[in-house]
Image (spheres, rainbow, N blue to C red):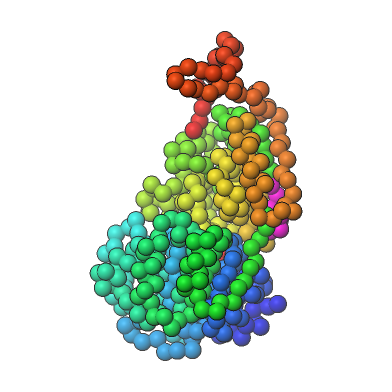
């Protein structure tokens, strides 16, 4: 199948050619014809599947068929969970609309930055708004924009929108959008809360399911390495140097760990930066830009911050800390091997997290997904299993540590890196 089969405006075809997309991805093949026909769409698709283009093209095609008045009325609204995703999605709209005969005004609105410049930008109106829900409501409360003329509503990463506590904001926004509209709903997962939202929002939707299973997710090679927790930074350094990995996205559990691991890598002369929710918007944008331009080798990120960021052809993802759930695991490793390119996902597993690793493996959506065996790497073999001690009423139950055990524990805690 080729993009020509969608009968798109020549200006959109030109923009696609500039992007050098050879053919539509599966989600684009399935969603675009229905979205162009004006149907509601309910799609399960992950970041990396090409879903942004799947909703951006039909919206832009629909705008080519109407006159855009000045000041602009907002005709399409895309709600996203994070500022990074807002910027990313907005950039896709901008790139695709570059050659359209009528200039299309695309505006990205998100929190964490001053509201005034966004209010200024909205003065002439915006045809397409890509926004996080909280900031959108703030701006609406200040009469900076109206969503009374929305023709198309997109909920992008709906599961994360709910996960991140945007339910109340979403409910308010949805009551203010005209009921007669097209709704396009994208989510990687469909827990009951997301299903309920989809039922409330959509009218006779076309259901599209191109959820990649881990096994077929764009040829991602998965590895798991058994290593003692305090030795993970050393192992990471070893792997980066030995394999000459050009760019690595490393996932950790906390902001503190992101900072610490990045500092340790920098001390080892590896160009690394943390990426987490407590950094300023400017800093995060800078880190992403540096990473994309290969000025940085490693970005050490927390889940929330890394959600939705798109770095084409990211070759390697490392789970320095294991994710909390199998779903998060799928999201994380989906950062590599994007849109058809191969990738490698390496997970560090310690004696303490082995059981959790097995659980993640067991809970994969795809029952046929092959089990990822635990490797060991020469020089980083784990010491023997940790002591099984439990604490109660101040006393220690279980095996008493020997002098050697205590010494080993002291060495480990001195080396401890999270
Ligand atoms: P998304 O799922 O929207 O985050 O897109 C993931 C990546 O796929 C982005 O880097 C897009 O530029 C890329 N992409 C989107 N559509 C295509 C396509 N048809 N062919 C190749 N890459 C694509």
Span highlighted in magenta in the image: 215-222
Query: Is 218 colored magenta in this rendering?
Result: yes
Residue 93 visible in image: no
Quadrant for the N terminus in the image:
bottom right
Q: Nearer the viewer, residue 201 or 309?
A: 201
Q: Eyeballing the image, is 104 above or below 318?
A: below
Taking depth in this image into account, of 389 and 84 the one nearest to the observer is 389
Residue that sits furthest to the top in the current view: 403
Q: Seen in the image, is 101 located left or right of residue 354?
A: left
**Residue 385 coordinates in the image, percent (x, y):** 64, 24
Q: What residue do we see at 71% from left, 29% from top? A: 378
In this picture, residue 186 sits left or right of residue 394: right
Q: Is residue 57 above or below residue 85?
A: below
Q: Report the image quarter containing ligand 1.
A: bottom right
Does the segment drawn in magenta span residue 374? no
- Residue occupying the point 70% across, 49% down: 221
Report the residue at 66% width, 34% height from top: 226
Q: In which quarter of the image is residue 352?
A: top right
Q: Is the magenta stretch mostly helix, strand or loop?
A: loop
Report the label total: 0
Q: Does residue 76 appear in this view?
A: yes
Of residues 26 and 186, the one nearer the viewer is 186
Picture coordinates of residue 24, whole percent (x, y): 65, 73
């Amino acid at each position: 199948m080729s993009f020509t089969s969608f009968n798109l405006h020549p200006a959109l075809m030109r923009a696609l050619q500039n992007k050098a997309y050879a053919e539509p991805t599966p989600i684009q093949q399935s969603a675009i014809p229905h979205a162009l026909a004006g149907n509601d769409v309910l799609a399960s698709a992950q970041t990396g599947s090409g879903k942004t283009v799947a909703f951006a093209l039909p919206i832009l095609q629909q705008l080519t068929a109407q006159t855009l008045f000045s000041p602009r009325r907002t005709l399409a609204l895309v709600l996203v969970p994070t500022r990074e995703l807002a910027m990313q999605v907005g950039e896709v709209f901008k790139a695709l609309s570059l050659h359209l005969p009528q200039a299309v005004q695309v505006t990205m609105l998100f929190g964490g930055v001053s509201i005034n410049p966004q209010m200024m930008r909205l003065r002439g109106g915006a045809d397409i708004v890509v926004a996080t829900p909280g900031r959108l409501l703030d701006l609406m409360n200040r009469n900076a924009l109206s969503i009374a003329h929305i023709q198309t509503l997109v909920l992008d990463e709906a599961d994360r929108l709910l996960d991140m506590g945007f339910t109340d904001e979403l409910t308010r926004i949805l009551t203010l959008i005209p009921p007669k509209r097209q709704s396009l709903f994208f989510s990687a997962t469909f827990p009951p809360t997301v299903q309920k939202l989809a039922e409330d929002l959509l009218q006779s939707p076309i259901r599209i399911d191109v959820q990649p299973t881990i096994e077929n997710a764009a040829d991602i090679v998965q590895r798991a390495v058994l290593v003692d927790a305090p030795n993970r930074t050393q192992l990471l350094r070893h792997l980066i140097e030995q394999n000459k990995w050009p760019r690595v996205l490393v996932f950790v559990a906390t902001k503190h760990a992101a900072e610490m691991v990045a500092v340790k890598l920098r001390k080892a002369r590896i160009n690394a930066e943390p990426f987490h929710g407590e950094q300023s918007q400017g800093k995060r944008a800078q880190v992403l830009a540096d990473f994309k331009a290969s000025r940085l080798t490693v970005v050490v990120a927390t889940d929330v911050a890394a959600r939705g960021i798109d770095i084409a052809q990211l070759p390697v993802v490392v789970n320095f800390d294991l994710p909390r759930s199998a779903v998060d695991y799928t999201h994380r490793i989906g950062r590599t091997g994007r849109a058809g390119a191969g990738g490698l996902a390496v997970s560090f597993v310690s004696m303490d997290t082995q059981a959790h690793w097995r659980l993640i493996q067991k809970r994969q959506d795809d029952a046929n997904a092959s089990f990822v065996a635990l490797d060991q790497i020469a020089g980083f073999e784990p010491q023997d299993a940790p002591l099984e001690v439990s604490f109660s009423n101040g006393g220690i139950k279980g095996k008493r540590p020997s002098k050697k055990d205590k010494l080993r524990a002291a060495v480990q805690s001195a080396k401890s890196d999270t």
